[in-house]
Amino acid sequence: MSLTTILLIILILALLGAIPAWPHSRSWGYRPSGLIGTVLLILIVLALIGKI
């Protein structure tokens, strides 16, 4: 496995973990998952164009 693949797997798991599904995190809104999703999208684009 390359470092990029491992990083993408970790970010996907972090994105799933940031979804506000638990009562204590419902007040956070979608900010945590939106931020992680944006980072994930940037990394996917960079991986597709071959920069990382």
Image (cartoon, rainbow, N blue to C red):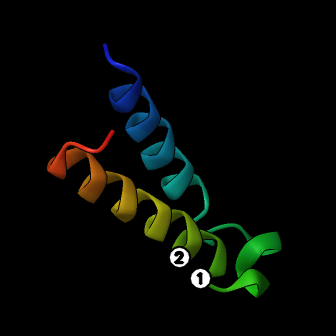
Q: Amino acid at mark 1?
A: Tyr
Cα distance between the residues tagged 1 and 2: 6 Å
For the C terminus, the quadrant is: top left
Instruction: Please name the residue shown 46% across and 70% down the image.
Output: 38
- The extreme right residue here reads 24
Which residue is more in the foreground, 23 or 7?
7
- The residue sitting at the left extreme is 49
Label 2 Cα crowd, 10 Å radius (few <14 / some 14-19 / many 20+): some
The percent position of residue 17, horizontal first and vertical second, equals 59, 53
Q: Which mark is residue 6?
A: none
Residue annotated with mark 1: 30
User: What residue is shown at x 72% (from left), y 80% (from top)?
Assistant: 26
Task: Answer whether labels 1 and 2 touch (C-beta < 8 Å).
Answer: yes
Side (left or right) of 22 relative to 19:
right
Residue 30: x and y in percent read 59, 82
10 versus 3 height, above or below: below
Rendered position, 32 above or below 2: below
- Which quarter of the figure is the N terminus placed in? top left
- 10 Å neighbourhood of mark 1: few (<14), some, or many (≥20)? few
Q: Position of residue 13 (x, y in %)?
A: 49, 44
The secondary element bearing badge 1 is classed as loop
Please name the residue that numbered disc 2 is placed on.
Answer: 34
The secondary structure type at the circle numbered 2 is helix
**Looking at the picture, how far across and down is residue 31, in whole percent?**
64, 81
- Seen from the viewer's position, the closer of residues 11 and 50 is 50
In this rendering, the count of numbered labels is: 2
